Image (cartoon, rainbow, N blue to C red):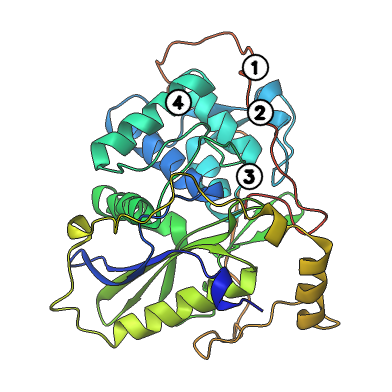
Amino acid sequence: MASASQAGPSVLVDLGTGKVLEQEDAFAPWYPASLTKLMTTFVTFRAIKAGEITMESPIRVSERASKEPPSKMGFKPGSVLTVDNAIKILMVKSANDIATAVAESVGGSRQAFVERMNAEAQRLGMSNTRFANAHGLHADEQMTTARDLAVLAMALRNEFPQYAGYYSLEAIKSGESLMENHNDLIMRFDGANGMKTGYTCPSGFNLIASATRNGRTLMAVVIGEPTVEARADKAANLLAKGFETSGDTAPFLGQLRPNGTEAAQPINLRSTICTEEHWKVVTEARGPAGKPVYTSPHIKEPTREPVVVAVGLGGATGPESPAPRYADVPIPTPRPDYAPGAMAEGG
């Protein structure tokens, strides 16, 4: 379903050595979509490490947060959940309302939290990344690169290995609502154990996927693909190839340099991804059942039901964030792009 001309940037990294086994257009600017939520999570972990909050601290859903577009949980304004449950929801459901609630609850305001995001990006050396919000809904000024996303994902793994379990959650349940992980490699690719998906019309379909085999963990960053299937197929093929590659002579991630031909601004894929013609082709390829059809020989049908973890409201017994609180005055932000009935933006 994806032509070569539609293929987006990618990076394959050995997390044990930090070496890049394969890369394509690693410095091309791109809209991160919900891969943004990895930085939202990273900032939250840093706040826990600093003693500002705990996993039991409250995340409060404000009226502003409740109005975020889908993908969302739909909790009513005034609802309170724990940091722990919020992160589980971000990783599996990729809920935009919860991302905003985290930003407001941890940072004191959305803008203050975004300032933390950008400070962390600078500290990590994500030199071509700029954040404008905590959820990843489209903003022209919010951009990154496949290389920078690899730096962020490695930082999450290396600085906070105790939280690796969040990235491999198979499904969560809130009330009667069951939500499976949008990462199609989970339960379908041998050794898959994370990390996050993302999608908006301008960005396309994105996936950071990790897997461990024989004690070796690899991570593929795949962005700008035209379909759910394309991002999963590409990630699976990269990982499988990587496990057959020693990488002894490969460069370290920090040694990568731009080739000098990168565009100044990201490509906006709206006219490619979010058209009736595109989704007609996708729908026809999936057949009458409507299920994604993968071409990678490394993706297999699950052989069991997903392990479901319950999430919900309440239980917030930890301290409030000491960050200064500001009046929730809406900050002018670009109107997000929407898909024409294809899928909610976030996953």
Dot placed on the residue nearer the N-terminal end, 1 or 2: 2
User: Which disc, if any, is residue 330?
Assistant: 1
What's the amino acid at mark 2?
Ala
Gap between marks 3 and 2, in whole Å?
10 Å
Gap between marks 3 and 1, in whole Å?
19 Å
What's the amino acid at mark 3?
Ala
**Image position, residue 107 (x, y; %):** 45, 22
Please name whichever residue, 302 or 320, is drawn nearer the observer in this view of the structure: 302
Please give the name of the residue rendered at 38% of the width and 35% of the height, measured from the top-left corner.
Answer: 43
* Location of residue 295 (image quadrant): bottom right
Whether 302 is drawn above or below 259: the answer is below
Gap between marks 2 and 4, in whole Å?
14 Å
Badge 4 is on which residue? 113
Secondary structure under tag 3 reads: loop
Badge 2 is on which residue? 65
What's the amino acid at mark 1?
Pro
Crowding at mark 4 (Cα within 10 Å: few <14, some 14-19, many 20+): many
C-beta proximity under 8 Å, tags 2 and 4: no
Dot placed on the residue nearer the N-terminal end, 3 or 1: 3
Gap between marks 4 and 1, in whole Å?
14 Å
Dot placed on the residue nearer the N-terminal end, 2 or 4: 2
User: Can residue 308 be spotted in the picture?
Assistant: yes
Please name whichever residue, 55 or 344, is drawn nearer the observer in this view of the structure: 344
